[in-house]
Image (cartoon, helix red, strand yellow):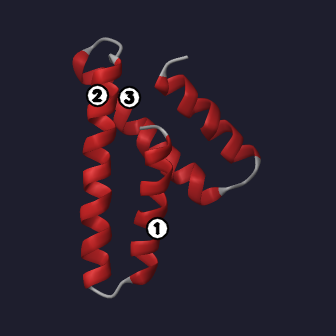
Amino acid sequence: MNLITRIEDELKQARLSRDDERRDALALILASLRSAQKELQRPLSEDEELQVLQRERKKRVEAFEAFEQAGREEQADKEDFELEVLEEFM
């Protein structure tokens, strides 16, 4: 099972269980992977999937640090949760 299919299944489960935070995080990850796949016009290799995930991880870490420095704890917590979900697939 490739990563996109696995995330789609996880997203479906999050929707069914009404886990909105997890659903939103998975949707963002899935959108990034699909965008990269569309850009290349072919399925992604495992290395390319990992590169996309690493790029998304870097964005989340930077956003978390920026929100934390600005004293915006709620947004920082959201970024931290998205980072945890993202790392499940790395």
Q: What residue type is labelled 3?
A: Arg
> Hey, which quadrant is residue 35 in on the image?
top left
The residue beneath circle 2 is: 36
Quadrant where the C terminus is found in the figure: top left
- For residue 78, the mark is 1
Badge 2 vs badge 3, beta-carbon distance below 8 Å:
yes
Name the residue carrying label 3. 34
Residue 89 drawn above or below residue 85: above
- Determine the residue located farthest toward the bottom in the rendered image: 71
Q: Position of residue 25 (x, y in %)?
A: 49, 51
Coordinates of residue 20 in the picture (x, y in percent): 63, 57
Alpha-carbon distance for marks 3 and 1?
A: 22 Å
Density class for disc 3 (Cα within 10 Å; few <14, some 14-19, many ≥20) is some
Nearer the observer, 47 or 35: 47
At x 29% / y 35%, what residue is drawn? Answer: 52
- Residue at image position (24%, 74%) is 66
Quick one: SS at disc 3? helix
Estimate the spatial distance between the alpha carbons at disc 2 and disc 3, rounded to whole Å: 5 Å
